[in-house]
Amino acid sequence: MTNTALLRKKIDESGYKLCFIAKQIGITYQGFLKKINNESEFKASEIKRLQDLLNLTDEIRDKIFLTVYVE
């Protein structure tokens, strides 16, 4: 399960719009929203593109995508 709060924080810090990020990682805006809201899962390739786009460290990437997180 994605740590939605931390992902949104990093997106806000980047200054990018959600639709821009979705296009950069190769998915639709609606598909991106579903993934952010844990309605579907990110693929490894999408996580890598997000890490590069948002300049996430490996540690932050792992906290967002690999840690079991319950809101």
Image (cartoon, helix red, strand yellow):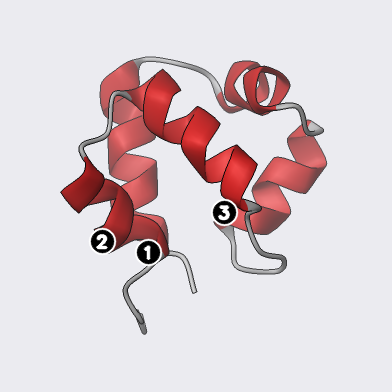
Look at label 1 and name its amino acid: Asn
Image check: 63 left or right of 8?
left
Report the residue at 81% width, 33% height from top.
28
Say if mark 3 contacts mark 2, CB within 8 Å.
no
Marks 2/1: CA–CA distance: 7 Å
Look at label 3 and name its amino acid: Ile
Residue designated by label 3: 36
Q: Neighbour class for label 1 at 10 Å: few (<14), some, many (≥20)? A: many
- Which quadrant, please, contains the C terminus? bottom left
Disc nearer the start of the sequence (1/3): 1
Secondary structure of the residue carrying tag 2 is helix
Q: Neighbour class for label 2 at 10 Å: few (<14), some, many (≥20)? A: some
- Give 70 or 58, whichever is nearer the viewer: 58
Q: Which mark is residue 68?
A: none
Residue designated by label 1: 3
Look at label 2 and name its amino acid: Lys
Say if mark 2 contacts mark 1, CB within 8 Å.
yes
